[in-house]
Amino acid sequence: MVVAAIWITEISSPFLHLREILKEIGYRDTDLNLAADVCFATIFSLARMVGGPYLVYVTMAADNPILIKAMALGSQLVSAFWFYKILKMMRYKIMRRSMPNTKSD
């Protein structure tokens, strides 16, 4: 179960780091950066909001100490918070891209 927990929590990390690297090297607000954002959001959401609750259920149903059960539940609550923040970020990015460009040169 520990391996599954680590896998679920870290599967989206490469895409999180890719997002930051792209911003650092000047690819902010590009299609490539948007693709990295979408990949990160999708993988994070599937892992933490589908795999996470299942793992919490298995942890709660098993004969684990209360501390392990509390840690599993706490981790899921943190994941739910970040899921909400990521949804807001993606909504903002998609809305911003769909707005007509109002710059006048």
Image: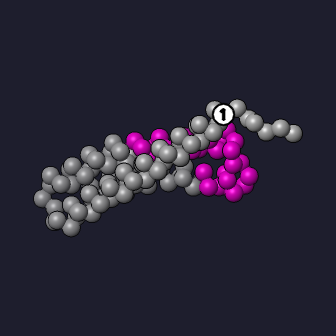
In the image, 95 versus 45, the foreground residue is 95
Residue drawn 28% across the image and 47% down it: 53
Local packing at callout 1 (Cα closer than 10 Å; few below 14, some 14-19, many 20+) is few
- What stretch of residues is rendered in magenta? 19-46
Residue 42 belongs to magenta span: yes
Q: Name the kind of residue labelled 1 in the image.
A: Met
Residue 61 in the image, given as x and y percentages of width and height = 15, 52
Residue 43 in the image, given as x and y percentages of width and height = 46, 43
Residue at the disc numbered 1? 99
Query: Where, quadrant-wise, is the C terminus in this rendering?
Result: top right
Horizontal side, residue 64 vs residue 48: left or right: left
Residue 66 in the image, given as x and y percentages of width and height = 17, 65
Horizontal side, residue 96 vs residue 64: left or right: right
| Number of numbered discs overlaid on the protein picture | 1
Residue 21 belongs to magenta span: yes
- The way the protein has been coloured in the rendering is one colour
Residue drawn 66% across the image and 33% down it: 99
Magenta: main secondary structure equals helix
The image quarter containing residue 6 is bottom left
For residue 11, say whether it is visible.
no
Kindly state the secondary structure of the residue where label 1 is placed: loop
Query: Where, quadrant-wise, is the N terminus in this rendering?
Result: bottom left
The residue lying furthest to the right in this view is 105
Residue drawn 12% across the image and 59% down it: 63
Residue drawn 27% across the image and 58% down it: 72
Horizontal side, residue 44 vs residue 20: left or right: left
In the image, 92 versus 61, the foreground residue is 92
Residue 45 in the image, given as x and y percentages of width and height = 42, 44
Q: Is residue 21 above or below residue 91?
A: below
For residue 102, say whether it is visible.
yes
